[in-house]
Amino acid sequence: MKFRLRRSGLYVSGIDTKKMADCGVYGADCIVLDLETHVPTSQKKFARILVKRAIKKVNFYNSEVTVRINPIETFGEEDLHEIVQEKLNVVMIPEVSDASTVKKVDSLLSDLEKERSIPSRISIIPLIEDAVGLLNVEKIAGASERIVALTLDADDYLLSISGERTKTEGELLYAKSKIVSVAKAYGFQAIDSVFLDENDDEGLYKESLAAKRMGFDGKRIVNPNHVEILHRVFTPPPESIKRAKRIIEEYEKDPERKYFFLDGEIVRRAEVESAMRLLRGAF
């Protein structure tokens, strides 16, 4: 799939028909139709049908259409058989602890795409939710060419290590840093954990700004009114885009150089790669 902005990922419950019908108007980069956490077990089958119809009928405008399926060990395979269709862009896989889970979803998607004559390849975003998944995240990242981003479920991860969530999120520094480092090493985006307080605009702003400074490219939310805050934080300023363009222009004059000078400052390969990522995400 073509590189695209994923600054904001708006979760929408698979049984909330009104919100699904309207979700495209909020301008989120990604709409995440949820079949897992926000759907009781007794309504999983019903939710699959609703999400399948929503993907086909709802106008999502320019938002990327993502579905968070259930764990592949429970209802995930049934979810895929119901929802896979041409307008589906991404499958988010929860509770990914090893590479085999991603490989299985990749194989199922390949079979369904072929069977249903779907011309474009559906992407994958693994959701890391426990200590084992974090330990194996490098193998997970290399498990499929469909992967476009990595993301962390902070609350479930902390449960797995008997940790406790605080406002400063110091307890998540290692986990978040590893997700970002592995994602960027593999050329993926890194998406920060979901922000659940629908009424705390200031808290979202501070948490998002800290995530951006760590290297995250976006964040997930449940309140449509929070889309604007995420876009304000994760959209690069004009002066950064201008400098990135100049770096790439100078770099392309001799790509074999290990470094060069721009405005009297040394520019190394790491800054060139950062400029490339910024420009891919800016347009």
Image: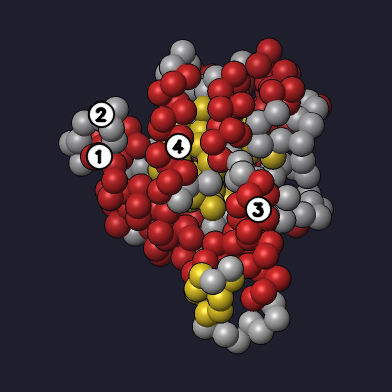
Measure the alpha-carbon separation of dots 3 and 2.
34 Å
Please name the residue shown 53% across and 46% down the image: 217
What is the x, y in percent for residue 196? 43, 23
* Disc nearer the start of the sequence (3/2): 2
Element on which disc 4 rests: helix
Amino acid tagged 4: Leu
Q: Comparing marks 3 and 2, which lies closer to the viewer?
A: 3
Please name the residue shown 67% across and 28% down the image: 51
Q: In this view of the protein, can residue 22 be seen by the observer? A: yes
Element on which disc 2 rests: loop
What is the x, y in percent for residue 237? 61, 44
| Residue 209: assigned label | 4
Q: Which residue is mark 3?
A: 241
Element on which disc 1 rests: helix
Amino acid tagged 2: Thr
Measure the alpha-carbon separation of dots 1 and 4.
15 Å
Please name the residue shown 34% across and 59% down the image: 136
Q: Comparing marks 1 and 4, which lies closer to the viewer?
A: 4
Q: Comparing marks 3 and 1, which lies closer to the viewer?
A: 3
User: How many numbered discs?
Assistant: 4
Element on which disc 3 rests: helix
Amino acid tagged 3: Ile
* Disc nearer the start of the sequence (1/4): 1
